[in-house]
Amino acid sequence: MISPIALTIAGSDSSGGAGIQADLKTFSALGVYGASVIAALTAQNTKGVSAIHMVPPDFIRAQMDAVFSDLDVRAVKIGMLGTEAAIISVAEKLTAWAGPQIVLDPVMVAGSGDPLLDGGAEFALRAHLLPLADIVTPNIPEAARLLGAAEAVDEKMMVSQGELLLSLGAKAVLMKGGHGSGPEAVDIFLDGSNIVRLAADRIRTKHTHGTGCTLASAITASLAKGMTMLDAVREAKVYLTNALIKADDLAIGHGSGPVHHFYALWPKIA
């Protein structure tokens, strides 16, 4: 058996709920071997981010060379990069090591509201990474910031903004509706040929730390296993929905705790 391999390029979350840690947990839960390139170290917990230490761009490049020169990586998830220099370094290496499918989660702000991307880096994200992405997965605030537009207030605006992101070079877009309101969490998938509405019941839980990372890494895992893009997105949404449903089974931290990545594998804790 050949194990499918996925790579995450992102920031480390010291509390384990988001970033590199959430990505590796998701890969493992979905039967994919996970490798990692750490672009930033964060001191954070379920209540917020208290400090960030950026990894030098040359060390990011060294990590990527080490992974790609040895492992048969089928899909790559990009999360928090933080700076223009890091973004450019990652884009250059992804171009040099062409082949894997690329899932871009344009992380700009933590769920706690703490900024995770330098203001000057937004242009670099649009110019250098969006054109490389097989899919980009912004939430409503992230899409607005990428486009310099107002936040979408309905599904029509989500479709319009998704189409604009396609015009910037992404091959597909998943507009995430978790920041919306109403009984359903509606995501919209666009790939230039199809517009697909993906709805699930909105889960009432405060434990939503790492949801964006988890969804993007679940898509990446399914792509590494050979699924089509739309099937990978559908499977990822089901996985995240179940991880949210089971989030209250965990008791991690005093703030917004993580989703339950291993809901299907761990016995319920009494």
Image: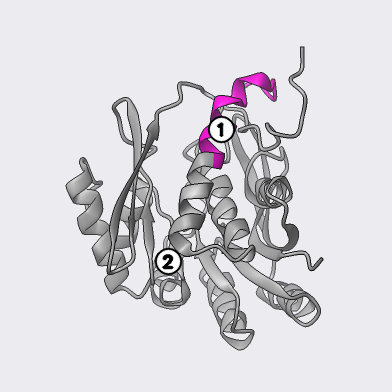
Quadrant containing the C terminus is top right
Q: Earlier in the sequence, mark 1 or mark 2?
A: 2
The residue lying toward the viewer, choosing from 252 and 254, is 252
Residue plotted at (55% across, 60% down): 82
The residue lying toward the viewer, choosing from 31 and 246, is 31
Residue plotted at (51% across, 40% down): 238
Residue plotted at (59% across, 54% down): 217
Residue 159, x across and y down, in percent: 23, 54
> In the picture, residue 10 is in which quadrant?
bottom right
Q: Secondary structure at mark 2?
A: loop
Residue range (magenta): 239-254
Residue 110 visible here? no
Residue plotted at (27% across, 68% down): 193
Residue 227, x across and y down, in percent: 55, 62
Residue 251, x across and y down, in percent: 69, 20
- Under mark 2, the amino acid is Gly
Callout 2: 10 Å neighbours few (<14), some, many (20+)? few
Residue 103 visible here? yes
Instruction: Please give the residue where the numbered disc 2 appears in the rendered image.
Output: 120
Q: CA distance from mark 1 to mark 2?
A: 37 Å
Q: Secondary structure at mark 1?
A: helix
In the image, residue 242 lies in the stretch drawn in magenta:
yes
The numbered mark at residue 242 is: 1
- Under mark 1, the amino acid is Asn
In the image, residue 83 lies in the stretch drawn in magenta:
no
> In the picture, residue 136 is in which quadrant?
bottom left
